[in-house]
Structures are given as C-alpha cells and as structure tokens.
Amino acid sequence: MNKLKKLGLTALAGSLVATSVSAGDLSVTGGASLDYTSTSETTGNGWSMGDSVNFNGSGDVNGMEVSLQIELDGGTYDDYSIKIDSGDSGAVTFSGASKGVGGLNNYADIVPTAYEEVYDVTDGRDHGVVGNISSTSSFAYNGTFGNLTVSAFYNPASVSSSSIVLQYADLIDGLTIGAGSGEVTTAQDEESMWVKYVTGGITVGWQRSEVDFSAAATSDTEADHYGISFAVNEDLTVSAGRQEVDFSGSGKEDEESSGISASYTMGGLTIGGHANSTDSQDGTSGEDETSKSINFSFAF
C-alpha cells in the first residue's frame, strides 16, 4: 500500500513539474475591414471586406521565449509560425505559411507610407520589388547587436532560396542605412539598398532594388523608390511617394508610379485611403492606370 502511495505521489509530482514547465499565455485578437477600391480599368462593385482572427501563444522554455502565431483569414489558415527567441543572441522563426519574417522578405519596401505603396493596386506585378521568396516551410533569423541588425531568410525547398540583410541605425541621429541580397531558386537574383531619415514627425526614405532574371526572355529591372510621410499628430499621418522602374532590353519604357495616402486612427477604428497612378505598366507605352481606395479597419 505504501508503495502504491509513493508511486502515486511521484506521478503527481511529475505532472505538476510538467504543468509548470509548459505554462504560458494564450491570447485571441481579431479584426475586420470594409474596403472600396476603384481603378480606371475596373467595372462593377468595388466594395469588399476582410476578416482576421489571430491566436498568439507564448511561454518560457528553458530560458527561451517560445511563441506560436496562427491567423485565420476568410475561415482558413492564412499565416502560422513558431518563434524561438534566445534574447541577446537573436530569434529564429519557422514559418509554416506566411509572408516571411526575415531577409529581403522583411525589407522589400522600407519607403514610408501612410496607407498603401504608390505601385499598389495599379501594378499587380510589383516590378522592381525584392523579397519575392516563398515562405512556406522556411526559416528566418533576426538579431540586433547595438545599432546593427542582422536578418536572414532560408527556404530549403528542392531548389533552395535565401537572402540576408544588414541594417545600421543612428549612423547619425535619425539616420538608418541598409542593404541586402538574395536568390530565388535559380530563377532570379535580388539586391537592394536603402536610406531612411526620421526627424520629428517627418520620415523620408529612398530604396534602390535590382532584380536579375536567369531567363533571357524576362527583362531585368532596376527601381528607385522614394517617399515622405508626415505624422500630423498621433492619430493622422499623410504621405507621398514615387517609384521609377527601368527595364532592360529594347522597346521598354520606364514604368512610373506615384501617389498619396493618408490614415487616421480613432481607438479601434483606422480609416485609410490612397490615390495612385502608374504609367507604362510592364514597360509598355500607353498602358496607364489610376486607382483610388478607402478602407475602414476595426480591431477587437
């Protein structure tokens, strides 16, 4: 009888230890949005909605902060990842399916904007933009050492893809510089460099990106993207920007995109909008388009 009692207490103690080790926090957040978009080439109903439910769990495991993020979007799994943060040594994230959180995927566009990028909506192909690496079943690393940030991405698919970024903050007060390079399987090589300066409520940014394709029939691109945003107050931000994309090969025009945007936040409600235009889409003369949108986002 004493042996059974001892065995039961031992099992109970083991159960309590396991419970203590696995203890953590789980939170659920959500959001919804209502959007109206109109373009010069679109007819019909421009209204649409979005929805998102996020599950975030975290806890301490052997001195490391481990967190899980799952997003349900439109009733299906959209993004999900697990992050292992060792503190001063940086954090490793495995993405089951998400946009990617490291390397050029994380720094594809650093130019400040209040709502949408100047090439958004009017140019669905996003020429001259880097970070087009599939993030399904991929690894990312992010670490900050003083003013230096190191960010890397690796997708070990049958034909692997990878990129790495170095960014240095406060070279002078408010000035950040960065550069990165990567390859998307054997199909393309990517490079980008940028400068961002913040003073008061004003943020100015410039980024040059190059994408070189291995296929001879595909035009390489070189893009300059620059913009400025101004935080009028803690609720209202406005911005303006421009992007110019140069295509290699004969018979191609420069694709030029420009636009303005604004966002205003009132508690859990954010109202955002943009007005963009793109000339010579895909480098084709006369292929021009404009777009306007307004979005109401609700967080809960």
Image (spheres, grey):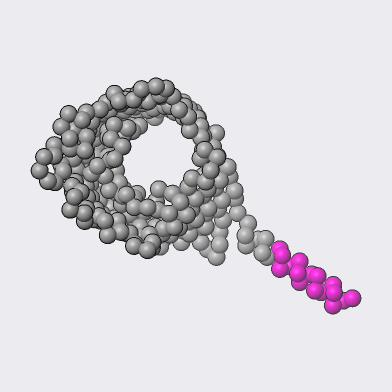
Q: Residue at x 30, y 25 (%)?
A: 41
Residue projecting furthest to the front: 217
Image quarter of the N terminus? bottom right
Report if residue 200 is visible in the image.
no
Report if residue 126 is visible in the image.
yes
Q: Is residue 72 magenta?
A: no
Whether residue 300 sits left or right of residue 221 in the image: it is right
Residue projecting furthest to the left: 250
Residue range corresponding to the magenta coloring: 1-16
Q: Position of residue 184 (x, y in %)?
A: 30, 56
Whether residue 42 sits left or right of residue 85 in the image: it is left
Q: Residue at x 65, y 61 (%)?
A: 20
Q: Residue at x 23, y 31 (%)?
A: 278
Whether residue 162 sits left or right of residue 32 in the image: it is left
Q: Position of residue 213 (x, y in %)?
A: 21, 53
132 and 165: which one is in front?
Answer: 132
- Image: 265 above or below 11: above
Q: Is residue 4 magenta?
A: yes
